[in-house]
Image: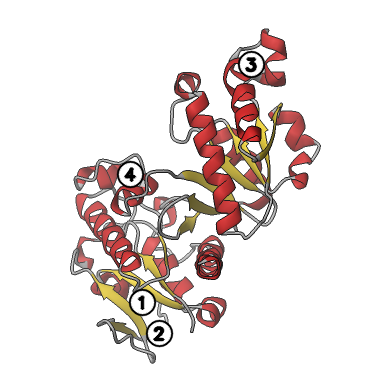
Amino acid sequence: MKPIIAITIGDFNGIGPEIALKSAFHPTVKRICTPLLVGPLNVFDHVRKQFRLKVKLEKALFPAIPKSALPIVDIGDGIWADVQYGQVTRAGGRSAGAAIEHAVALCQAGEAAGMVTAPVSKEALTLAGYSFPGQTEMIALLSRSLRFAMMLVSDKMRIGLITTHLPLGAVPTNLSMERVHEKISVVHEALQRDYRIRKPRIAVLALNPHAGEGGMLGNEEMEIIIPSLDQLKSDGIAAEGPFAADAFFGTHQYERFDAVMAMYHDQGLIPMKMTGFEKGVNFSAGLQIVRTSPDHGTAFDIAGKGKANIASMVEAIKLAVLFSRNRTRGT
């Protein structure tokens, strides 16, 4: 049977409803899974009419899921009259947050094999009372996942992050042997469980230029990263480095590894997006449930104009299907 994948609406003032709806009846998606939209039915119906999409929508009433229409879990929160394209509103954040909560519950109950989240506005979520740095942290708490790591993946590379959404000046003080060890261990386990790579090879980037130049350009490599790598190797994890990031990507060394661990956000995301911007996927490694998302934001500037590219969303759904099947195989 095709797995059921829950797809959240995201912020309805952005491109979330558009890409969720268009992706759900994309031929590739329909062939590999049963897409289950999660969000206010009237918002999805408004978007359907606005873009003249030839698809029928119908409420999903478990355990029955309609086969002749696109099923929707109607969270009953938000009305289409509240939609203000391109604006940050409490209603948009409230609807997005409620959709995430419902999708996690569906996965925990076994009614969905995985979830894919459309982009949200962190500011709108905060206005609605959700105090999380991002969707990953919220989903981790809801799914009772104690260890997780943010990964960005494309057909060119897989990038894991040691630190995520921090000001650049705060990165060094947030690096520790414990954090480096944990994040790399989580990514290693995800490569084995979700990608079914038996013996993953992981490259670890340096924090400082030229990998610190023996301490002349920083001590983090000698004091934190190298000792962490030694510990990981003793644990049986094939982690190599620290590599100077510029030469590492410039000479395509990433092609030799199953994943690359970056010390901070832009260090990993710039090369990843340069090589696969339209089809990049955000993957929350280590969660108790399968969760992916497109690797872009709410795109408020083009919301409501029918210009959104669904390629990344389709790739996110494909990965959620792959991971859910691989996890089933591994049990």
In primary-sequence order, the first of circles 4 and 2 is 2
Disc 1 marks which amino acid? Arg
In primary-sequence order, the first of circles 4 and 1 is 1
Q: What separation in Å lies between label 4 and label 2 (alpha carbons)?
A: 30 Å
Disc 3 marks which amino acid? Met
The circle drawn on residue 55 is: 2
The circle drawn on residue 48 is: 1
Element at label 2: loop
Q: Mark 3 points at which residue?
A: 222
Query: Which x, y percent locates residue 312?
Result: 54, 60
Q: Which of 238 and 55 is in front in this view?
A: 238
Task: Name, please, the residue furthest toward the bottom.
Answer: 68
Query: Which x, y percent locates residue 288?
Result: 40, 56
In primary-sequence order, the first of circles 1 and 2 is 1
Using the rendered view, name the quadrant where residue 55 is placed.
Answer: bottom left
Whether residue 199 is situated above or below residue 268 in the rendered picture:
below
Q: Are marks 3 and 1 in contact (CB under 8 Å)?
A: no
Residue at 69% across, 51% down? 199
Q: Select label 3 or label 1 by which is in front.
A: 3
Q: Select label 4 or label 3 by which is in front.
A: 3
Query: Which x, y percent locates residue 196?
Result: 62, 60
Q: Do the residues labelled 2 and 3 touch (CB within 8 Å)?
A: no
Residue at 44% across, 50% down? 297
Q: How crowded is mark 2: few (under 14 residues within 10 Å), some or many (20 or more)?
A: some
Q: Select label 2 or label 3 by which is in front.
A: 3
Q: Do the residues labelled 4 and 1 touch (CB within 8 Å)?
A: no
